[in-house]
Image (cartoon, helix red, strand yellow):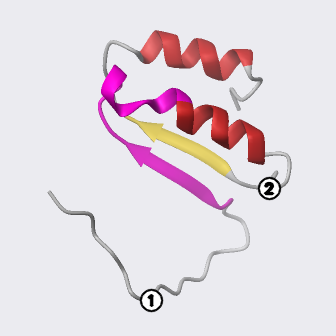
Amino acid sequence: MAPVIFKTMSATRAENIAPRVVSVGRLVEQKNFPVLIRSFADVSGRFPDYKLDIYGEGPKRGELQALIDSLGMSE
């Protein structure tokens, strides 16, 4: 399956909605969600309004939640 590539994107956002990074996938080793979570933690100080939403289920859910909690990113 090939990725979807947009040549141009333009969007407006409502003032009362926080900007979000969204990821969707099975919570398994192959998806490497820890890299996403740690990367977001590294840049979140520069972009405090941004939120990371991860949608999915899988055997790594507990481990990923523990990583999120340890990085102080539960909110």
Please tell me which residue lies in front, 74 or 34.
34
Relative to residue 63, is residue 22 depicted above or below? below
* Occupied quadrant, residue 39: top right
Instruction: Find out whether residue 75 is within the magenta segment.
Output: no
**In the figure, is residue 75 to the left or right of 54?**
right
Relative to residue 24, is residue 9 depicted above or below? below
Q: Secondary structure at mark 1?
A: loop
Please give the residue where the numbered disc 2 appears in the rendered image.
47
User: Looking at the picture, how far across and down is residue 58, in whole percent?
Assistant: 31, 19
Is residue 68 in sight in this rendering? yes
Q: Residue at x 56, y 53 (%)?
A: 21
Indicate which disc residue 8 carries: 1
**In the figure, is residue 68 to the left or right of 45?**
left
Point out the stretch of residues depicted in magenta. 18-34
Instruction: Find out whether residue 31 is within the magenta segment.
Output: yes
Characterize the local packing of mark 1: few (<14), some (14-19) or many (20 or more) Cα atoms within 10 angstroms: few
**In the figure, is residue 11 to the left or right of 17?**
left
